[in-house]
Image (cartoon, rainbow, N blue to C red):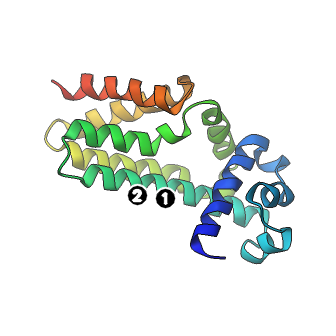
Amino acid sequence: MGSDRRTQVLDSALEVFARYGYRKASMDDVAKAADISRPGLYFYFSSKPELFRATVQHSLESSIEAARLALADSRQPLRERLIKAFDHWAGRYAGPMAAEIDALIDSNPDLLGTMPVEYPKRFRALVVEAIGGRSPADVAGTLISTAIGIKHDAETPDEFRARMTIAVDLYCSH
């Protein structure tokens, strides 16, 4: 299975786990959603816990990397970099899946280890670095809290982006 195929399986698994929860989701459900045979799925992921960990790690890692790249783009003004970074970190999960994904992560702490704590810390550090001398820790913390709230309230990723743009403008214009 190439990395593109693995990514497709992990993306499909995220949707299945978010829809059914960890306990109700089955390897069959994931295999069907990813359009792969069940033996093919088991060849790469020997168990549901292994698949779940890989799915969450892939999702968090891809969000962090996309946010890092957005924040590092020095050709863009800080405002644009922050909006893009928050969109990658939280906006992609805005809408109906937001609460389901958070509940899924919160209800399976033994399977995920330190991931739910470490990834937000990594994102916060990226934002603090990008903000620089503008009391970065306070601005980063406020923007992160705002993004979490908007993620749960917005009905679509587009609405998340629009509202996060307003928040970034308000926090960073002074």
Q: Secondary structure at mark 1?
A: helix
Above or below, comparing residue 105 to residue 173 in the picture: below
Q: Secondary structure at mark 2?
A: helix
Residue drawn 17% across the image and 44% down it = 132
Above or below, comparing residue 22 to residue 52 in the picture: above
Which kind of residue does numbered mark 1 sit on? Glu
Q: Which mark is residue 61?
A: 1
Q: Which mark is residue 94?
A: none
Total labels: the figure holds 2
| Residue 156 locus on image (x, y percent) | 55, 29
**Label 2, on which residue?**
65
Residue drawn 31% across the image and 50% down it = 70
Residue drawn 63% across the image and 33% down it = 99
| Residue in the foreground of this view, choosing between 117 and 83 | 83
Decide: few, some or many residues near mark 2? Use Cα within 10 Å; few <14, some 14-19, many ≥20. some
Above or below, comparing residue 35 to residue 80 in the picture: below
Q: Quadrant of residue 141?
A: top left
